[in-house]
Amino acid sequence: MQLRKLESYGFKSFADKVELDFDMGVTAIVGPNGSGKSNITDAIRWALGEQNIRNLRGVKTEDVIFSGSSNKRASGVAEVSLIFDNSDGVLPLEYQEVVVTRRIFRSGESEFYINKVACRLKDIHQLFFDTGLGKDAMSVISQNKVDQILNSRPEERRAFFEEVAGITKYRTRQKDSIRK
Ligand code: ATP
Ligand code: MG
């Protein structure tokens, strides 16, 4: 599975349509401070189903919608699509290409799509379960996460390694069974 392309409009600082192609290998996004580099990773996490707006550096749900600038009116809607090459079949769908889309209106109404068919947020979460790319996976490490890891207490650091090693779910189950 490989992220091939990101398409968005009205997302955060990107009022107009954005199309980014990701080739094989490493893609670096460079630009001055405040130019929107982190907004691109926010777009990826948001489309993967991130529900905690603080993890996207916002306060209110609609903070992901372009809020206007001196020469452009605010958008009424934000949309992000991620296009995956699924020729290796990692995503449990019978399609070579999988497109995941999330849209939000200023009214607060949200829509989710898999290959242009409306679905629930839960379906998006389930699609990426155990692929290493879900909303809680470590596939996106933000600037504040690096600081958090460097400044963490030993127990917190251990929790981080357990999460990466996939042990957290067993710990949760262990705690549940001890409680019962
Ligand atoms: P740095 O190099 O400092 O990490 P960056 O390139 O990662 O910067 P971002 O944090 O992605 O920059 O972008 C921040 C910019 O996005 C700010 O100017 C902020 O005002 C703008 N921004 C964030 N949300 C919105 C929004 N909803 N509407 C318009 N602009 C927004
Ligand atoms: Mg940044």
Image: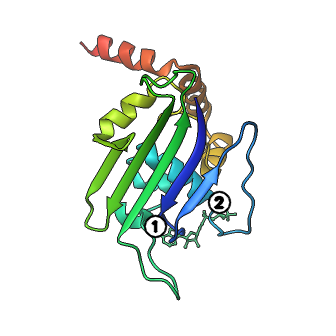
Q: Which mark is residue 41?
A: none
Q: Quadrant of ligand 2?
A: bottom right
CA gap, disc 2 to disc 1?
A: 15 Å
Q: Is mark 2 within 8 Å of ligand 1?
A: yes
Q: Residue at x 74, y 69 (%)?
A: 32
Q: Residue at x 37, y 47 (%)?
A: 51
> Mark 1: which amino acid?
Gly
Name the one closer to the observer, 54 or 119: 119
- State left or right for residue 118 relative to residue 133: left
| Residue 135 appearing in the image | no
> Mark 2: which amino acid?
Lys
- State left or right for residue 37 relative to residue 57: right
Name the one closer to the observer, 83 or 163: 83
Q: Where 164 sits versus 42, above or below?
A: above
Q: Which mark is residue 10?
A: 1
Residue underneath mark 2: 37
What is the x, y in percent for residue 115? 39, 39
Which residue lies most toward the bottom here? Answer: 70
- State left or right for residue 9 relative to residue 109: right
Q: How many marks?
A: 2
Q: Where 53 sits versus 31, above or below?
A: above
> For numbered disc 2, what is the local secondary structure?
helix
Q: Residue at x 45, y 30 (%)?
A: 128
What is the x, y in percent for residue 19? 58, 57
